[in-house]
Image: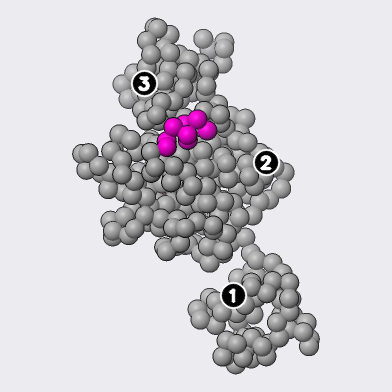
């Protein structure tokens, strides 16, 4: 966008949404020529903004594109600091987590957010790949600097799952489930994945990169097996900008609880959304498998399982599969 004039024209149109603004008024208030205003309208249209032009009345904004432009994401924020100072939006990145980690290394303050329309090397947990077609879903990472020990960093993942479920519920009425530790699911299919990575010293986290991928408007046939999008769940396309704003708003609220030492409140919410409570599961740990019934999550975010051998197992990380009754 031709920076000064473009942003200026768009801001005027936004603030006067629904009202016509004459070319003359715009050129006077922005101190640019009328042809510069006209040119900017064309540029904005090319970007996907719907602008109505009427002779003798002027221009008015009637629609914004559902593209993850930084300015548009920022418009939906009610946060105080998350995404406020540093919000970067790219067309293509290798991985938003890598980009946010670079910001962490550059000592940027917490709250920086990096969005991308497409990732060439999007990744998930346990070395998996995260794929998402260009321009249909939400892919972003946030830089946080929580005062936690490395062992406590998984709290951030649990918190983010709760935030994502509440944001989707507020916007669509659909209540998704959480499958410990980081999957947000609908009827067993994955809607959202969370990848928390950190840089830490032995006893303190330097920074955490919280990466979130949400299947918003893709068709299942363009997603990996076992995944589903909100569009398919709700039967309509959703505004990604609005959802991104809601998620950041919720994340800031929930992270504030975490910082205030009120993680237990998040655990309580988490348990209400959990699809694992009381279920028979198998957990693949690094060197062994645990099979049993899930009894809950503790205040560190670890999963507790009443194992078939009668022991209570505490699991801090691993891959959980829900067993059907017949799987014994
Ligand atoms: C998982 O389910 O294993 C986690 C998936 C996390 C995907 C997101 S998309 C944005 C961010 N960038 C990445 O490379 N990964 C995360």
Label 1: element kind: helix
Tell me the CA gap for discs 1 and 2: 31 Å
- Foreground of the two, 126 or 209: 209
Mark 1, other Cα within 10 Å: few <14 / some 14–19 / many ≥20: few
Q: Earlier in the sequence, mark 1 or mark 2?
A: 1
Residue 67 falls in image quadrant: bottom right
Query: Which labelled disc corresponds to residue 89?
Result: none
Label 2: element kind: loop
Residue 111: give x, y in percent of width and height.
41, 55
Circles 1 and 2 in contact, beta carbons < 8 Å: no
Query: Which labelled disc corresponds to residue 314?
Result: 3
Q: In the rendered structure, does residue 79 fall within the stretch colored magenta?
A: no
Secondary structure mainly formed by the magenta segment: helix
Query: Which labelled disc corresponds to residue 11?
Result: 1
Residue at position x 27%, y 48% in the image? 206
| Residue 262 seen in this snapshot | yes
Q: Which residue is mark 2?
A: 173
* Range of magenta residues: 262-269
- Left of 327 or right of it: where is 28? right
For residue 291, above or below residue 18: above
């Amino acid at each position: 966008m031709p920076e000064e004039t473009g942003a200026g024209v768009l801001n005027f149109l936004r603030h006067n949404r629904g009202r016509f603004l004459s070319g003359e008024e715009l050129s006077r208030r922005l101190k640019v020529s009328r042809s510069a205003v006209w040119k900017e309208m064309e540029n904005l249209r090319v970007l996907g903004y719907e602008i109505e032009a009427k002779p003798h009345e002027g221009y008015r904004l009637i629609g914004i594109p559902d593209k993850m432009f930084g300015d548009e994401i920022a418009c939906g924020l009610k946060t105080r600091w998350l995404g406020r100072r540093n919000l970067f939006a790219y067309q293509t990145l290798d991985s938003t987590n890598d980009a946010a980690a670079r910001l962490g290394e550059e000592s940027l303050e917490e709250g920086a957010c990096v969005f991308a329309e497409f990732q060439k090397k999007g990744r998930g947990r346990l070395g998996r790949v995260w794929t998402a077609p260009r321009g249909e879903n939400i892919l972003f990472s946030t830089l946080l600097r929580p005062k936690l020990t490395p062992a406590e960093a998984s709290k951030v993942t649990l918190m983010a799952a709760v935030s994502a479920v509440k944001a989707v519920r507020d916007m669509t009425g659909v209540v998704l489930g959480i499958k410990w530790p980081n999957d947000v699911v609908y009827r067993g299919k994955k809607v959202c994945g969370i990848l928390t990575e950190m840089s830490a010293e032995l006893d303190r986290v330097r920074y955490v990169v919280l990466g979130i991928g949400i299947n918003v408007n893709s068709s299942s046939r363009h997603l990996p097996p076992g995944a589903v999008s909100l569009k398919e769940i709700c039967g309509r396309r959703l505004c990604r900008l609005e959802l991104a704003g809601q998620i950041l708003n919720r994340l800031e609220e929930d992270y504030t609880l975490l910082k205030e030492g009120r993680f237990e409140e998040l655990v309580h919410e988490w348990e209400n959304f959990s699809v694992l409570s009381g279920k028979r599961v198998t957990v693949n740990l690094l060197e062994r498998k645990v099979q049993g019934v899930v009894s809950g999550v503790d205040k560190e975010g670890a999963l507790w399982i009443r194992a078939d051998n009668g022991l209570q197992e505490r699991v801090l990380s691993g891959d959980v599969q829900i067993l059907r009754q017949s799987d014994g």
